[in-house]
Image (cartoon, rainbow, N blue to C red):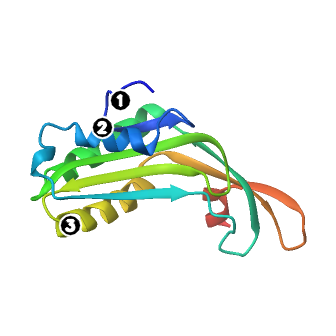
Amino acid sequence: MPRLSRHSGVYEKARITLPALLESIKSNPNFAKAGAVGVFVGVVRGETIEKNMVQKLELEAYAEKANEVLAEICSELKERDGVVDVQIHHLIGEFGVGEDVVYVIVAGVHRHDVFPVLEEAVERYKKEAPIFKKEYIIDKEETPRSYWVSERKTR
């Protein structure tokens, strides 16, 4: 696995792993100040809100802009008191149920410094980064369907 050169971004599936990211955050020269590391791992859920069975997800991104947005979110959150490092890494490609799709890692001086920043980082990347999700489902009538999640929300 190649050494990571940046602390956020979108990557093709299987290009990064959580253990490599944890090593990356620990290699931060300021990591000695950290007393806590919080990790959020987003995975493919097997059921939609409407109780349809998910077969798989396809994730795409406007990579250049997504990388810019993720870097900006990380940079802003790193400025908070007690925060040592923030990383957001989103995977793109095709994913089955249970597979990892995003890693958000926050290192902080104390645990109370980590949790609010971790939650904000997750909420912000979901709203701000141009990353698009297509769900492949089996609906209640047992019919296979697919749709971009943003389309479903506007119906």
Residue 45: percent from left, percent from top: 63, 63
| Quadrant in the picture for the C terminus | bottom right
Q: How far apart are marks 2 and 1 (CA)?
A: 7 Å
Is residue 59 left or right of 42 when viewed as pictured?
right
Q: What residue type is labelled 2?
A: Ser
**Number of other residues with Cα within 10 Å of mark 3, as a class: few under 14, some 14 to 19, many 20 or more:** some
Which residue is tagged 2?
24
Asked if marks 2 and 1 touch (Cβ < 8 Å), the reply is yes
Is residue 67 left or right of 94 when viewed as pictured?
left
Is residue 55 left or right of 63 when viewed as pictured?
right
Q: Which amino acid does label 3 sit on?
A: Arg
Q: Which residue is drawn at 76% across and 66% down?
A: 53
The first of marks 3 and 1 along the sequence is 1
The first of marks 2 and 1 along the sequence is 1
**Number of other residues with Cα within 10 Å of mark 1, as a class: few under 14, some 14 to 19, many 20 or more:** few
Residue 111: percent from left, percent from top: 20, 67
Report the number of discs. Answer: 3
Residue 32: percent from left, percent from top: 11, 46
Q: Helix, strand or loop at disc 1? A: loop
Which residue is tagged 1?
4
Q: Which amino acid does label 1 sit on?
A: Leu
Q: Helix, strand or loop at disc 3? A: helix
| Quadrant in the picture for the N terminus | top left
The mark found on residue 111 in the picture is 3
Q: Helix, strand or loop at disc 2? A: helix
The first of marks 3 and 2 along the sequence is 2
* Quadrant of res 92: top right
Q: Distance between the residues labelled 3 and 1?
A: 25 Å
* Quadrant of res 19: top left
Q: How far apart are marks 3 and 2 (CA)?
A: 19 Å
Q: Residue at x 54, y 49 (%)?
A: 101
